Image (tube, rainbow, N blue to C red):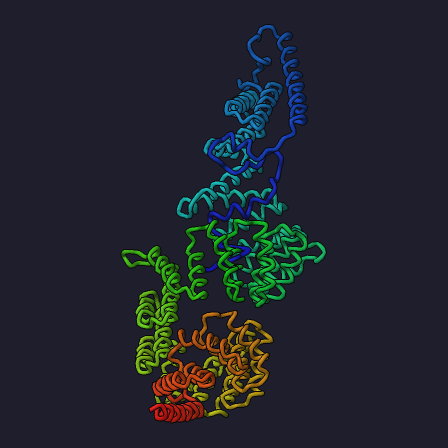
Amino acid sequence: MIYGVYDLVGDCNICSIVSHFSHLAPKAAKIRRFPPRVTHPIVVMAGPIRMNPTRTCTFLLALLLTCSIGSLAQDNEKSASPTNQSTPAATSVTPSGQKAPDKAAAYYHFAMAHIFEEMVSMYGRADYANKAIDEYRLAIENDPTSDYLNAGLAELYARTGRIKDAVLEAQDILKRDGNNLEAHRLLGRIYLRSLGDMQAGTQSQEILKLAIEQYEQIIRLDPKSVEDHLLLGRLYRLNNDLVKAENEFKTAVQIQPDSEEAVTALSILYNEEGDTSRALAVLNAFPEGARSAKLYSALGYTYEQNKAYKKAIEAYQKSVDLDHDNLDSVRGLAQNLMNDNQPDAALVQYKVIAEADPSDAQTYMRMAEIYRRNGKLDEAHECLKKATAVVPESLELKYNMAVIEEAQGKYDDSIALLKQLLEKTDHTNGEYDTSEKNNRAIFIERLGTVYREANKPQLAVDTFRRMFDLGDDNAIRGYQQIIETYRDQKQWQLATTTAEEAAKKYPSDRQLQMVAASQRADLGNPGPAIEQVKSMLKGTPDDREIYIALAQMYSRTREWPQAEANINKALELSTKQEDKDYATFVAGSIYERQKKYELAEESFHKVIANDPKNAQALNYLGYMMADRGTRLEDALGYIRRAVALDPQNGAYLDSLGWVYYRMGNYELAEENLRRASEKIGSDPTVQAHLGDLYQKTGHLKLATTHWQRAIEEWNKTVPAEVDTDEVAKVQKDLESAKVKLAKQTGTKE
């Protein structure tokens, strides 16, 4: 899909495992954690080390002094045993005939190996790495049973990219001593690193099993190691063995209850299992005074998954307060402000992110979306330009740019961008995976919508039909858009035929069944249609949509008591704020059609109080007040806000023209009514308003033209959408104007 998603925890896959483990410190100093692998082994060793030259030189001098002492000891042995002049130390033989370990020589070569390792870190020369390996080998020759030396060599092999040699060396140690903890740890880390370098597949699963085997041995030998329990838990999680993963995380929490890492890991696992309640219980049990930015971030994410957005905001805010530089927490805060319908507050946070990380294209796109919703299209366009500099080939970015072009009325530019997206995602064989189908459906649906707004209805219909081959859900949306396009064009029979076709093809889709029933009701057969919709009621919270559909159907047949009763039932079943707002808006429209203006105004004010940027409610309230000629300044304010949010909406432009007409500002009235007519010229109300305007300004002939057009459009409209009182008024004005024009013509003759 084209969504930009800001998850604290993504899918647990092979490539992400290293990022989960990288924060853990090495358990012991004997075997050092090697840095991330890069191409050249010298870069591997030198890259992450930052050394103080003075301290390093002092350290080397100390080592050289130690080595000198070792050499002196060897010289003394030489003097005491003149028969052995060719070896660093005297050769002694055990009763079994094996050479006895020479600890002094072994230590001497180990010290030299360590010096060369440090020199590699300082100077980055490959020959020093080879010399270090040679010295380790000489040390082992003098003390072949030393696991410490063998482990050091294995670690050096690993650090320099000689993984096979490292594995063999560690395995040799385990053959001699299966309980050697450090050898198990080294093998575990090697397998762990190998997982991060592999793509998912059979081989990666084999390496995963080897890593699990090593860490199972590690926790057997060191059962109190929190870090190793966490590592093993994450490996189990990667292997989809969630029960074992949970046990390891729980063990880590039991060993160290104040381990934030253990608590967070357990909560993440519960979130992935969809058990947000247990995740919250684990996180909230952690002492509040000991919580860090990371834990608050995990808590915010968990509240977000639980759709408790206000609590998520609170947690993310605490995380940001503790660590201002943690942009992931700022992103979480911004996202949940959006979820809680606080776009302006979210914009403030997105600006912080953009300033700190100018390469974050997703942030620019989210800022653009907020600006677009606020009607600030130039600012939105500017944000998208900045994102383009970062990810010029992003499909999501090009799509958002097309949406902005559409909002600015640049339909040709928007169409061109959407066509480019479809060409770029086209497969010649016509085969697409689910994600590709959904993306193409979004592009196609938007393209059809732009065609419809550009008054190209047939192109819109043809475009929407392309959604039929992209899966059932996309096909259903395609049918709904085609029905809407036919209704806009007053092609009622085509709309009904299409609705019946869709309902027959998808009998289990409740929305399509209700649309088909509504179409039949509009064509003059409301009784059976309403009964069909009633039969869908199941006595569950899902009945909300059915009650709304019934309320609208009763409203269109002017059965007001039934309409009010059903919308009130829908309100009772509405739990989400957005659902309550929509049901309240429908209730307001039902009251307005009955001329219950006070109740209608109260309903619209409720919606606007909860959602100040609800353009539909702002427009409806403003138009209702303008049409009655009451509180015109307030009406103008509401309508202006609606137009700012959707400047290309023909209905809003008509409202704006009409309120200017009522205020006596005929110039602005004409400007906006003409713009409305260009966009929705088949709307009889727009034509009637133009007729009234031209009559008022003394252009009687133009007035009759528009009134006549209004009557013609009403005659094409189904009875459910006709206000008979309004038609009668326009008809009377038209007849009167014709008489006046006839008299004027007779007088001239």
- Camera-side residue of 740 and 689: 740
Residue at position x 55%, y 60% in the image: 271
Above or below, 108 relative to 612 = above
Location of the C terminus (image quadrant): bottom left
Can you see residue 182?
Answer: yes
**Residue 618 found in image quarter:** bottom right
Q: Nearer the viewer, residue 389 or 508?
A: 389
- Of residue 346 and residue 326, the one placed in the foreground of this image is 346
Instruction: Work out which quarter of the rendered image holds the N terminus and state it.
Output: bottom left
Q: Position of residue 629 (x, y in %)?
A: 55, 86
Q: Is residue 328 above or below residue 702?
A: above
Residue located farthest toward the top when viewing the structure as drawn: 82
Report whether residue 278 is seen: no
455 relative position to 697: left or right: left
Counting every numbered tag in the picture gives: 0
In the picture as drawn, the residue positioned furthest to the left comes out as 429
* x, y percent for residue 589: 50, 84
Residue nearest the viewer, comparing 125 with 78: 125
Q: Position of residue 522 (x, y in %)?
A: 37, 86
Q: Quadrant of residue 349?
A: bottom right
The vertical placement of 194 against 591, above or below, is above
Residue 627 rendering spot, x and y as whole percentages? 52, 85
Name the quadrant containing residue 577: bottom right
- In this rendering, the answer to whether 429 lies above or below 548 is above
